[in-house]
Amino acid sequence: MCMRRFNVWIAILFIVACELIGSIGSLATAPNIPTWYRGLVKPPFNPPNWVFGPVWTTLFALMGIAAYLIWQKGTAKKPVRHALTWFGIQFTINVLWSFLFFGMQSPLLGLLCIGVLWGLIAITMQSFFRVNKIAGYLLVPYLLWVTLATYLNAGIFILNF
C-alpha cells in the first residue's frame, strides 16, 4: 500500500483516540490529587497541579498527529507496522504509570514504570524518525516532559519513603 493523501478527518480521529486513551489514566489520578498526592513532599521545580492537564492534552494531540503521519505512510510497510507497534506499547505503559503511581499510591512502582516508559518513548521516536522525520520530532516534547516526570517521580520517592 502506498502513501495516503493527508486526510484531516482521519488525523482528527487519531488525535481524539489519543486524547481518549490518554485520559484513562485520569481515572486513577484525579481522585488522588487532592488527597494522597497533596500530602507528599515534592522536589524543587515541581509545576503547579493545573499545568499537568493542559500539557498532557497537548502531548496527546501531538502523539495523535505523529501516529497519523506514520499510519499515512501505509501499514503494509514493515517499518510503519513496527513504529505503530512501539507506539502502542509505550502508550499502554504511559497509562499504566498513572495506575501504579496514583492508583496504587506507589512512587516506587511508578518510578520503575516511568523508567521503562522513557526507554520505550526513545525507541518509538527512533522508529518514527525512520518513517517520517516530522512524526519523530513531534514526540520530542513528550520525551522531554516524561524526563521531567521521571525527575519528579524519583524526587517524590526519595523525599517520602
Image (cartoon, grey):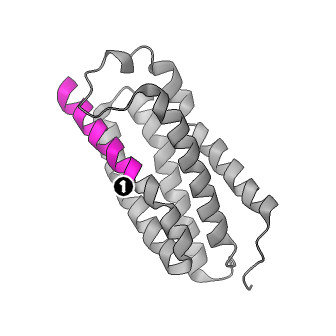
Choose top left, top right, bottom left or bottom right for residue 80. Answer: bottom right
Type of residue at label 1?
Trp
Q: Which residue is mark 1?
A: 118
Q: Residues within 10 Å of mark 1 (few under 14, many from 20)?
A: many
Q: Residue at x 57, y 56 (%)?
A: 63
Q: Which residues are magenta?
A: 144-161
The answer to whether residue 65 is above or below residue 45 is below
Q: Quadrant of the C terminus?
A: top left
Question: Among all residues in the image, which is located at the extreme bottom?
Answer: 2
In the displayed structure image, the side of residue 73 where residue 107 appears, left or right: left
Q: Quadrant of the N terminus?
A: bottom right
Q: Residue at x 52, y 75 (%)?
A: 133
Q: Where is residue 5 drawn, in percent x and y?
A: 78, 77
Label 1 element class: helix
Q: Where is residue 68 drawn, in percent x and y?
A: 67, 65
Q: Where is residue 98 drawn, in percent x and y?
A: 46, 36
